[in-house]
Image (cartoon, rainbow, N blue to C red):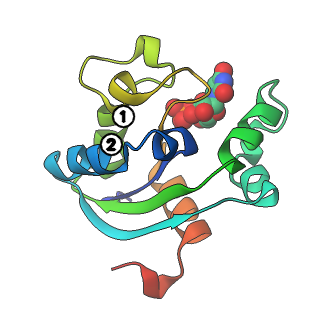
Amino acid sequence: MATNRTFTMLKPDAVEKGHIGAILEKISASGFRIVAMKLTQMTKADAEAFYAIHSERPFFGELVEYMTRGPIVAAVLEKENAVEDFRTLIGATNPADAAEGTIRKLYAASIGENAVHGSDSDENAAIESAFHFAGREQF
Ligand code: UDP
């Protein structure tokens, strides 16, 4: 069942470089409504749990280090076809492969430090939103 919601994080590199405003502007201009949002920092345990699916991958240690080194902006976004449309808006995992005008093309430095997260399914969007937000924090 499509839920019309997705979950995003503006990752530590995007926050460090001062891109919060520009990225949120692009997200809003692309028709997404922000229904939950906060500045927060993931603990090592948080990042290991959030990215558990990648625990056997060679980049896992670096990924956890990166995702915990500073604050992130976590948000839940609403739009028709939210998961797929948001993945299109952020672009490919590796910014070198990302289409022109996508958030990763504009703001990501590398495949590791790629500025933004977007859920890859409705099921994961619900799991990831619940990971970061209590029900009363989602509007
Ligand atoms: N990642 C990495 N090296 C890789 C692939 C992924 O460091 O070779 C990181 C990157 O930050 C990516 C995250 O792990 O966003 C999750 O990877 P996934 O394949 O799920 O990509 P995404 O869904 O974020 O595009």
Residue 86: give its label.
Answer: 2
Q: Quadrant of residue 80?
A: bottom left
Q: Nearer the viewer, residue 1 or 13?
A: 13
At mark 1, the secondary structure is helix
Residue 17 appears left or right of 26? right
Which part of the image, by quadrant, shows the C terminus?
Answer: bottom left
Q: Residues within 10 Å of mark 1 (few under 14, many from 20)?
A: many
Which part of the image, by quadrant, shows the N terminus?
Answer: bottom left
Q: Quadrant of residue 113?
A: top right
Ligand 1 - quadrant of the structure image: top right
Q: Amino acid at mark 1?
A: Ile
Q: Residues within 10 Å of mark 2 (few under 14, many from 20)?
A: many
Residue 128 appears left or right of 1? right
Q: Residue at x 37, y 42 (%)?
A: 19
Residue 46 appears left or right of 88? right
Q: Residue furthest top?
A: 96
Residue 98 appears left or right of 29? right
Ligand 1 within 8 angstroms of badge 1 C-beta: yes
Q: Is residue 3 visible?
A: no
Q: Is residue 43 visible?
A: yes
Q: Nearer the viewer, residue 114 or 33?
A: 114
Residue matched to label 1:
90
